[in-house]
Amino acid sequence: MWFVVVLAGMSIRRDLLGVTSIVRVLGLNENCYHPLLRFFHSSAMNLQKLTELWVSLTLKLFKKVIVNERYLIIGDGIKIAKSGKKMPAVKGLHQVSSSNTKPEFIMGHSCQAIALLAQGRGTHFAVPLASRIHEGLVHSDIPKQTLSEKMIALLKSLKLDRSFYLVLDAFYSNRKIIKGILGMLEHLVVRIRNNAVAYYPAPRPEKPSRGRPKIYGEKVKLGTIFQKLDFFIAAKSPIYGRRFTREVH
């Protein structure tokens, strides 16, 4: 019942003052404050099980976008400013963004989120599947994971019932994301960085010699591949909601 009370309070509260907002908007007695506060530190709720139930419910309720018998999954990171510097997981963060409306440095939470692309009423929209705070929290003594590794772990925890295409931005075009997706036998759609490079397999020497064998072969700048338009197929694409289309490769 406390769980239902918390969900109701978080859905209709008018301000963001934590448990106080829930007590105020539901008109609860002041004695309910401490029981509600203990709820957030309780181990009675299994977050992993709750996430799996939400994912299965989402797949039943919404009309999914299916491409080549695969879901379209969207992932991204977000940094949310917080006023309380002593809140759990609040830390100094650097925002890398082309938008000049965002401050370069903030105190806040760094989260990563995954959503499912759905459709309805003639439009497309993203349905959130899971979001976690991935910086500023230490749960164990295991070696520190990178944000890319945590994104792959979050994706695996969803336990989707079919294959998917994962769409990410250029921040995630790195080795750990690519190897993680390949290990899951899935496909990745991502914009590569301008300085991204790849290597051909190292040639095997005809006669083994002393020393460590080569790991990498010839280096290739990936940006040069996209200059060869013969490798790509032209398709029509709308531009930010406009009616006319243009051909893209």
Image (tube, rainbow, N blue to C red):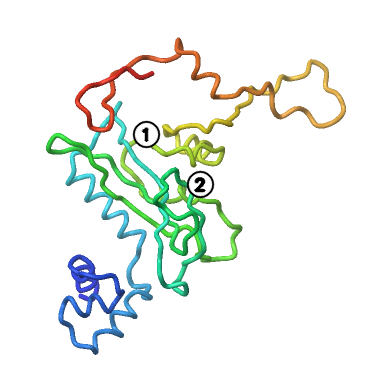
Residue 183 spot, x, y in % from top left? 50, 37
- Look at the numbered disc 1 and give the secondary structure of its residue: strand
Can residue 156 be seen here? The reply is: no
| Residue type beneath disc 1 | Tyr
Direction top: furthest residue: 230
Residue 51: x %, y % from top left: 32, 56
Q: Residue at x 23, y 44 (%)?
A: 59
| Location of residue 47 (image quadrant) | bottom left
Mark 2 and mark 1 in contact? Answer it, CB < 8 Å: no
Helix or strand or loop: what does disc 2 sit on? helix
The answer to whether residue 151 of the structure is visible from this angle is yes
Q: State which quadrant residue 119 falls in.
A: top left
* Image quarter of residue 68: top left
Left or right of residue 93: residue 160? left
Relative to 75, does residue 132 appear above or below in the rendering? below
Q: Nearer the viewer, residue 72 or 211?
A: 72
Q: Residues within 10 Å of mark 2 (few under 14, many from 20)?
A: some
- Label at residue 231: none
Residue on which the image places disc 2: 148
Q: Position of residue 125 (x, y in %)?
A: 23, 41
Q: Is residue 30 above or below residue 129?
A: below
Quarter that holds the N terminus: bottom left
What residue is shown at x 31% (from left), y 36% (from top)? 72
Residue 15 horizontal/vertical position (percent): 25, 70
Q: Is residue 53 left or right of residue 146?
A: left
Rounded to the nearest whole Å, what is the CA distance between mark 2 and mark 1?
Answer: 17 Å
Mark 1 or mark 2, which is nearer the start of the sequence?
2
Which amino acid, mark 2? Ser
Q: Which residue is mark 1?
A: 165
Q: Nearer the viewer, residue 47 or 216?
A: 216
* Residue depicted at 79% across the width and 15% down the height: 206
Outermost left residue: 121
